[in-house]
Image (tube, rainbow, N blue to C red):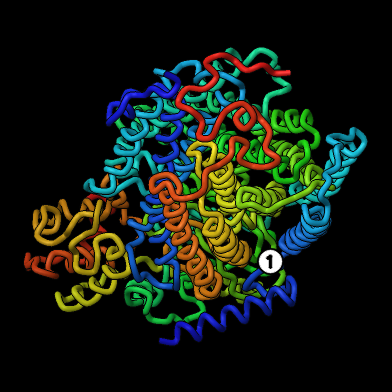
Amino acid sequence: MSLFRKLALIVASFSALLLSGCGDDIKYNMREGVTEISREVYDLHMIVIWVCVVIGVITFGAMFYSMFAHRKSKNPNPAKFSHSTVVEIIWTVIPFIILIALAVPAVGLLIKMEDASDSELTVMVKGYQWKWEYKYIDGDDNLGNDVSFFSNLDQKSRDLSVNSGSGFSGIEITDENYLLEVDNPLVLPVGKKVRFLVTADDVIHSFWVPDFSVKKDAVPGFINEVWTKVDEPGIYRGVCAELCGKDHGFMPIVVKVLPQAEYDAWYAEKVAEAEAGPDLNERTMGQLMAEGEAAYNKYCSSCHMPNGEGNGPFPSLVGTAVTTGPIEKHIDVVLNGVSGTAMQAFGNQLTEAEIAAIITYERNAWSNDMGDKVQPQEIHDIKNGGGE
Amino acid sequence: MADHKPTGISRWLFTTNHKDIGTMYLVFSFIMFLIGGGMAMVIRAELFQPGLQFVEPNFFNQMTTLHGLIMVFGAVMPATVGLANWLIPMMIGAPDMALPRMNNWSFWILPAAFGLLLSSLFMEGGAPNFGWTFYAPLSTTYGPPSTDFFIFGVHLMGISSIMGAINVIVTVFNMRAPGMTLMKMPLFVWTWLITAFLLVMVMPVLAGAVTMMLTDRHFGTSFFDAAGGGDPVLFQHVFWFFGHPEVYIMILPAFGIASAIIPTFARKKLFGYSSMVYATASIAFLSFIVWAHHMFTVGMPVQGELFFMIATMLIAVPTGVKVFNWIATMWQGSITYETPMLYALAFVILFTIGGFSGVMLAMTPVDWQYHDTYFVVAHFHYVLFPGAIFGTMAAVYYWLPKWTGRMYDEKLAKVHFWLSIIFVNLTFFPMHFSGLAGMQRRVPDYAIMYSDFNMLSSIGAFGLGLMQLLFAWILIKACILKKGEKATDQVWEGAEGLEFTHMPSPAPYHTFDTPPKID
């Protein structure tokens, strides 16, 4: 086992790190980020650290000096003093002044961070157990074709996480974007002031992108506001920062920042996609089962497990009432969720084709053998008022 | 007569003796400490490397939740109550606590409370899994069925704490020996008196929070549900109005302990006694007006954020005064380094490091980057483990000879100290780095850039866990096997205070039947 070699390496790199002081490697310090605000936050962070280090050196220096110089063997006769008003006033006033000096830049920066006025683009960010929804609220286009989509953890990370072995001899994961990759990233234009309206569907989540110094709680039923203006195109990664249940650690945020022209092209494509409407082509049983297995593993298996047998509070789908009962009820549960439980309403999260495939798969996989299927068109009709 | 006591199990069930009750509190808290620590071992094993190797995410969340609840309510708080029971009557020259029967009851509620909480592990749906802060609606609409057991468990813990606190207040105000004026009381009594006031004021608030949860879950109210006109953020305000004074409830007694131990081993009077008292009172006052610094990202108005930022930063002033006073106490003293002193000094240094990260966290704009990351985990473990828990260990080593009449094994205790110091820093210091780099709290799995620091933390944690078994062995050796030389009445060369100057070692079952004379 190379564990010991690994350990030795870590210890070596750790000592190198201590010797080299606080560098700017994002592995052990806050990152500077890519916005004006994030750089100011970083600067303030470094100022406070150094103030703490200086105070620490003076305080602990005095303490260690005393521990050494005033030990019994060196100083057998202790002094008698037990108070000094002057000294006590000094060490009350000096920290007070230092704190005020620290508070002044902090106040200015905070006021700037909280000012979301004059934004050029508004994106609604909505947290779900355990994914994000992004909705572009375009001021110029009130035609009702807002672009919106869901963003899930990528399948590769999900598979790696579950299949990483057991015990201390787990499989070494080398993918540097492990748990930091999604299927559909949030896309933003560079150099534009973007306002995020942050909210949640179920429990509290928190939208955090460290490179932007943006962290705002997503509270169900309330809308919080936060903004950013990114200087450089690139891909920036964040995570949900508030405990939101089982898969809290598995709902990353990926933001792709594009030059304006590329962003416009991407946006136009998304609008066209929305206008084209959903893919409602009829599918064979085989196609539904294949698409269903992929979609089930992506959206359902983290709770109901890949073998369908459920886990803890999440019910089994094998031979149970919903999956082997009337199909209408099954469709209703998937579309509208079960209130008061973690079962969400997937009607607006997934496409008609995905829902049809998942339901067909659940009714025919494992030892379920219902033999029936449902087509995307039927789902579409039910969603839009039970048929036209 | 003086040492007459009942025997057998009924001695412990029905006892009203402050020393017996203190012992039971201490033993109970140590058992809880080992259980909560065992859960920490599960957490650190899972976090040893990226990927899910040991437990599932849902069980991981149950472990973090119970670890927090057990350590806060089961280990740290009962340990300080145990110390208060043993020491306050002896320190103020009282024969016992003022309300001995209530004292018995407030202890015996605890096993029931933690029985309820721990039994939830074996229930369908599992134990509470929403973190020790149990934010709504994760804990209300989305909580597992066992949440109700958690709610009643918290109610019982609250009742126990309130009764314990009332007992301390009544004892201190009514049972002091003639001549023991308030400003002559040892600082441990002062810090506990202030802690008791904090407890009486905030435990009912916690009870209110869990009661609102209960009615939201079962009786159709919507305190924390926006769909019914409530507000999930209201929960956080109520919780942290309890939660912030709570952290001082855990740390103030340790301040008192350090203020007792450092003068003894520096052979010099405590520097700035009255400023210590005023600083403690200021900290307690400030602790009531800073709660929302736990909620800087929740979407407060900017004016609110500014107020809570500045109020929080102010706490550094009285805390600094205390640290400077301890150093001034050592200054030109005649210092020796027995185990209690080592723990007390480690407490001062490492608690101060936790204080530094506290100042950083207080600053709202940068807190947006620290909030809910491992940086916060590092911060509060620095103030709780090498803070409150090292303080308690210092107290146990310092007063154990007085309690049992025998010295503990000094050599083993030094080993316990030095290895603990290494492991505690190995566990918690790397968490600063993983947090700054961007690792969020309460996750069972993480991106690979955090793996080095997590592996270090896990190794440190396993070592730290082992050290507690060594601690148990040292205590068993001294208390049960009764090995170790006899302690003198004064125990330590520089020790002052009634418990060292006015009674033999071990302290008899009944002390101060007639009050001592205090000049």
Does residue B221 lie above or below B442 as drawn? Answer: above
Chain letter of disc 1 in the image:
A
In this view, the residue in front, A172 or A374, is A172
Q: Residue at x 55, y 83 (%)?
A: A8
Where does the image place residue A20, in percent across and percent down from the top left? Answer: 74, 77
Does residue B486 lie above or below B445 as drawn? Answer: above
In this view, the residue in front, B398 or B74, is B398
Where does the image place residue A86, in percent across and percent down from the top left? Answer: 93, 36
Q: Secondary structure at mark 1?
A: loop
Q: Residue at x 78, y 59 (%)?
A: A53
Where does the image place residue A222, in percent across and percent down from the top left? Answer: 51, 41
Please give left or right for residue A146 compared with residue A191 in the image.
left
Can residue B374 be seen in this snapshot? no
Please give left or right for residue B74 compared with residue B329 in the image.
left
Where does the image place residue B62, in percent across and percent down from the top left? Answer: 36, 52
Task: Locate the C terminus of chain A and report the quarter of the image it occupies.
Answer: bottom left
Q: Which quadrant of the figure has residue B41?
A: bottom left
In this view, the residue in front, B45 or A69, is A69
Residue bearing mark 1: A230
Q: Amino acid at mark 1?
A: Val
Q: Estimate how packed mark 1 is, as few (under 14), some (14 to 19) or many (20 or more) residues with alpha carbons within 10 Å.
A: many
Task: Locate the N terminus of chain A and report the quarter of the image it occupies.
Answer: bottom left
Please give left or right for residue A6 compared with residue A339 in the image.
right
Can residue B280 be seen in this snapshot? yes
Does residue A331 lie above or below A93 as drawn? Answer: below
